[in-house]
Amino acid sequence: MKILSNTGGLAETNGYLMADETTGHAAMIDAPEATTKPLLDMALSHHWQVEMLLLTHGHWDHLSDHAVVTRAFAGAKVMIHRLDEPKLEEPGSKLYPLPYTIPARKADGYLEDGAEIHVGSIGLKVMHTPGHAIGHACFYHDGGAGGKRVLFVGDLIMAGTVGRYDLPDSDLGQLLASVKRVMALPDDTHLLSGHGERSTVAAERNGNRFMHERGVV
């Protein structure tokens, strides 16, 4: 499993490319604006076929480049949790006007809690983790036979903090429940967030002030 990332856009958002180097199958996780092209170019140079774009949620900074992905790989399916599809159908920011327009579209498929997504031989388990957004989802790879455990955690948890819960579709109670669910994963699980640096469950258990103040850990 190969994971590449790039950060950019107005909100300094992280986008990820995950590939099964053995089979050549690949997926994008989130599509921040002005961020996906270098990752897509890397996929093309390695002859990896990007088969899907997995959106952790529908906030504008995570889906702005969805059309860039599907232009480069026409067969890539755009997938999101059903509860966040309205944000894909009417994309944009509710807080301030954006200096660009995001094309509207429907999802090609829906991310259901507990579902298993396969990128080549790599399995990703979908976790519905509302709180930052009603249809927020994380994607968990359990490491398989001796591999590294990874959770694409979107904007639920960021190194040392958590995602915003003061947005129109946010809910603190749901966020706390979702964070508790993630913190039940093994301590060596690597957390790949939508913003900021990578972390681990152990690092957040020991050093995340929000979690300690709210009694999550």
Image: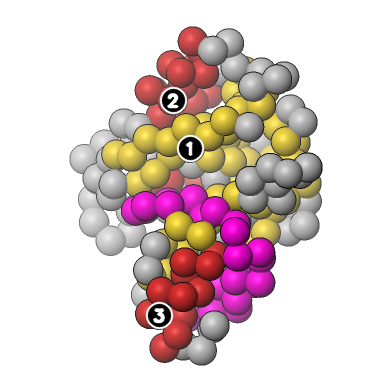
Q: Residue type at mark 1? A: Tyr
Q: Residue type at mark 3? A: Phe
Q: Is residue 46 visible?
A: yes
**Which residue lies at the image location 53% right of the left edge and 40% below the top edge?**
29
Does the segment drawn in magenta span residue 189? yes
Which residue is identified by label 3? 210
Q: For the residues marked 1 and 2, what is the alpha-carbon distance in whole angstroms?
A: 8 Å
Whole-percent x, y for residue 20 in the image = 66, 27
**Which residue lies at the image location 45% right of the left edge and 57% below the top edge?**
199
Position of 174 with respect to 125 (left or right) is: left
Whole-percent x, y for residue 87 in the image = 49, 51
Whole-percent x, y for residue 143 in the image = 70, 46
In this view, 117 is above or below 1 = below
Which residue is identified by label 2? 39
Position of 189 with respect to 115 (left or right) is: left
Which residue is identified by label 1? 16
Crowd band around label 1 with a 10 angstrom C-alpha radius: few (<14), some (14–19), many (20+): many
* Residue 32, image quadrant: top left
Crowd band around label 3 with a 10 angstrom C-alpha radius: few (<14), some (14–19), many (20+): some
Do callouts 1 and 2 mark residues in contact (Cβ within 8 Å)? yes
Does the segment drawn in magenta span residue 127? no
Do callouts 1 and 3 mark residues in contact (Cβ within 8 Å)? no
Circle nearer the N terminus (1, 3) = 1
- Which secondary structure lies at badge 3? helix
Q: For the residues marked 2 and 3, what is the alpha-carbon distance in whole angstroms?
A: 33 Å
Q: Residue type at mark 2? A: Leu
Name the quadrant of the C terminus.
bottom right
In this view, 183 is above or below 5 = below
Do callouts 2 and 3 mark residues in contact (Cβ within 8 Å)? no
Whole-percent x, y for residue 138 in the image = 60, 55
